[in-house]
C-alpha cells in the first residue's frame, strides 16, 4: 500500500467518528471497504483448525492459493455474484447431559465475508449501543457485566429486580424488522443485500437444505452483532427512553446478548416494566418464557424484610452464577454475593468425567496437562469475587475423579495417594483462587 493511501483501519476510525458525532447519519458508501486488505486481515484472524462447512475447505487449504482466492472473492463480491452457502448443522454432545447441542458451521468464504461486514458495522454501531450492553462487543466481557451489576445493586437503592428469558431468541428474530432497523444507519444497498442473503441462506442438515425465514445466521460471526442491533432497538432504547423517563426511582437494565436483568428502586416501576416488556417484545415477534420470568425482592431491604418474615431472600441466576443477598465481613453493610450455578457445576464436572473416560488411555503426562488447562479455564471464568468455595470444591472433585481413573489403570488398589501426590509435583495443577475482582468500578 502506498504511503499516501489510507488504511482500512483509518477509514473505519473516520466512520466511527462520524457515527459518534451524528446519530442520525445514514452511511451510503461502505461496501468499497470490502477489499483485499480487510479480507486478508479477517483471514489471518480465522481459527487455524476450525471445522469446515459444506464447502469442505479448511483455512490451510484456502491459504495455499490465498492471493488468487481473495482476488476471485473480491471480484464476485463487487459484481454482486457472491452467494452465501447454507450453514452446515451438526450436533455435538452437551456436557453433563445425554442431549446434543446443535452447532452451525458456515463455509470458509462466508466466514470471511461475515467478518468483514462485522468490522464495518461495528465501527458504526459501537457508537450507538448503550453502556449496559455487554455481549459480544470489543473490550467487553461477562465479567464487565457482572461488575456493572454489582455496582448497580450495592451502590444504588435497588430493592426489586426482574429477570427474564426470551424463548429461542436467535431463532425468532424477525428478519424483515431487522432489515428495517439496519436502514436507520445503513443506506448502502450492497451491504444490506448481502446481509439479507446471509439471513436467507438457510441450513443444511443430513444432506437436506432448509430455508430460514426468521432468525440470524447460525454459527456465523455476524449473528451476535445482528442480535445486538435487534435488541438495541427492541429493548435497550425503549428502556432508556421510555421506562427510565417514566420511572419514579432508580432503574437500570444490564444485558449480555439475550440474557438480562433489570434493577428497580420501587415495586411499581418493576411491575410496569415486567408488564410492558412482554407486550413490547411481542410486537417484534419475541416471547418471554413465563416460567423463567419473574419479579422479586432483592437487596438490603429485601434481606431485612425476609428475615422478619422468617423467610430466605430470593436468588437469581445470571451469566453462570447464582446471586444472593449477604453482608460484608463485619456485617455492617449489604453485599450481593455469587456462586457457581449448581447445574453448571454438575455439568462441568460430568463433562470432565466424560472426557477422562474417553481419553483414559492417553499418556499420564498428557492427561495431567489437559486437566490443568481445563482447570485454568474454569478458574478464569468462575474464579470471581466471593466464589472461592465453589471453585475449591470443583478442584477437589476433579482431583478425586483423576485419582479414581488413574487407579483403574493398574491392579485395583495399587495406586496410592502418596504416589498420586508425587505425580502432582511433577505435573502440578493450578490452585483454585480468585482471579477476577468484581469490586473494580468500570470506567468507560
Image (tube, helix red, strand yellow):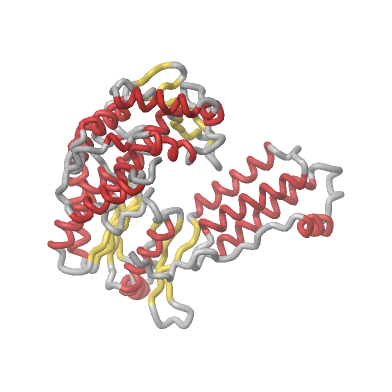
Residue 436, position as x, y percentages in the image = 50, 64
* Camera-side residue of 131 and 246: 131
Total of numbered circles in the picture? 0
The residue at the point 63 percent across, 40 percent down is: 354
The residue at the point 50 percent across, 30 percent down is: 91
Query: In this rendering, is residue 144 above or below 93?
Result: below
Residue 375 in view (yes/no): yes
Query: In this rendering, is residue 263 above or below 30?
Result: below
The residue at the point 15 percent across, 57 percent down is: 241
Query: In this rendering, is residue 113 above or below 129?
Result: above
**In the image, 73: left or right of 175?**
right
Question: Quarter holding the C terminus?
Answer: bottom left
Query: In this rendering, is residue 30 above or below 381?
Result: above
Question: Quarter holding the N terminus?
Answer: top left
* Camera-side residue of 278 and 180: 180
* Camera-side residue of 408 and 283: 283
Residue 9, position as x, y percentages in the image = 36, 47
Residue 318 in view (yes/no): no
Residue 220 occupies which quadrant of the picture?
top left
Residue 189, position as x, y percentages in the image = 20, 31
Amino acid at each position: 500500500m502506498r504511503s499516501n493511501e489510507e488504511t482500512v483501519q483509518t477509514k473505519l476510525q473516520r466512520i466511527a467518528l462520524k457515527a459518534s458525532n451524528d446519530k442520525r447519519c445514514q452511511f451510503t458508501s461502505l461496501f468499497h471497504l470490502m477489499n483485499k486488505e480487510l479480507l486478508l486481515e479477517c483471514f489471518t484472524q480465522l481459527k487455524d483448525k476450525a471445522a469446515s462447512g459444506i464447502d469442505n475447505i479448511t483455512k490451510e487449504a484456502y491459504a495455499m492459493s490465498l492471493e488468487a482466492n481473495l482476488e476471485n472473492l473480491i471480484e464476485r463480491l463487487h459484481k454482486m455474484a457472491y452467494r452465501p452457502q447454507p450453514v452446515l448443522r451438526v450436533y455435538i454432545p452437551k456436557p453433563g447431559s445425554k442431549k446434543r447441542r446443535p452447532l452451525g458451521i458456515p463455509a470458509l468464504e462466508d466466514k470471511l465475508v461475515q467478518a468483514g461486514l462485522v468490522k464495518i458495522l461495528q465501527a458504526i454501531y459501537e457508537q450507538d449501543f448503550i453502556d449496559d450492553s455487554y455481549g459480544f462487543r470489543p473490550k467487553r466481557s461477562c465479567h464487565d457485566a457482572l461488575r456493572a451489576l454489582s455496582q448497580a445493586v450495592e451502590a444504588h437503592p435497588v430493592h426489586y429486580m426482574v429477570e427474564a428469558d426470551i424463548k429461542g431468541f436467535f431463532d425468532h428474530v424477525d428478519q424483515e424488522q431487522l432489515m428495517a432497523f439496519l436502514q436507520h444507519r445503513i443506506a448502502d444497498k450492497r451491504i444490506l443485500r448481502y446481509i439479507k442473503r446471509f439471513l436467507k441462506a438457510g441450513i443444511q442438515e443430513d444432506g437436506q437444505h432448509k430455508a430460514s425465514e426468521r432468525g440470524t445466521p447460525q454459527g456465523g460471526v455476524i449473528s451476535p452483532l445482528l442480535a445486538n442491533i435487534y435488541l438495541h432497538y427492541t429493548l435497550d432504547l425503549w428502556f432508556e427512553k421510555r421506562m427510565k423517563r417514566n420511572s419514579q426511582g432508580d432503574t437500570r437494565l444490564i444485558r449480555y446478548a439475550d440474557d438480562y436483568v433489570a434493577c428497580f428502586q420501587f415495586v411499581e416501576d418493576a411491575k410496569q416494566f415486567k408488564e410492558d416488556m412482554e407486550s413490547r417484545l411481542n410486537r417484534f415477534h419475541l416471547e418471554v418464557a413465563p416460567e423463567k420470568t419473574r419479579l422479586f425482592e432483592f437487596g438490603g431491604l429485601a434481606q431485612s424484610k425476609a428475615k422478619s418474615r422468617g423467610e430466605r431472600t430470593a436468588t437469581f441466576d445470571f451469566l453462570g452464577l447464582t446471586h444472593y443477598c449477604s453482608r460484608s465481613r463485619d456485617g455492617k453493610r449489604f453485599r450481593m454475593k455469587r456462586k457457581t450455578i449448581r447445574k453448571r457445576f454438575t455439568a462441568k464436572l460430568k463433562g470432565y468425567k466424560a472426557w477422562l473416560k474417553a481419553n483414559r488411555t492417553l499418556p499420564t503426562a498428557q492427561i495431567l496437562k489437559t486437566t490443568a488447562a481445563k482447570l485454568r479455564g474454569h478458574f478464569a471464568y468462575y474464579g470471581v469475587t466471593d466464589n472461592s468455595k465453589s471453585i475449591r470444591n470443583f478442584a477437589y472433585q476433579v482431583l478425586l475423579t483423576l485419582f479414581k481413573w488413574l487407579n483403574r489403570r493398574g491392579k485395583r488398589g495399587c495406586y496410592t495417594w502418596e504416589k498420586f501426590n508425587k505425580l502432582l509435583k511433577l505435573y502440578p495443577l493450578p490452585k483454585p483462587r480468585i482471579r477476577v475482582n468484581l469490586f473494580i468500578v468500570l470506567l468507560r
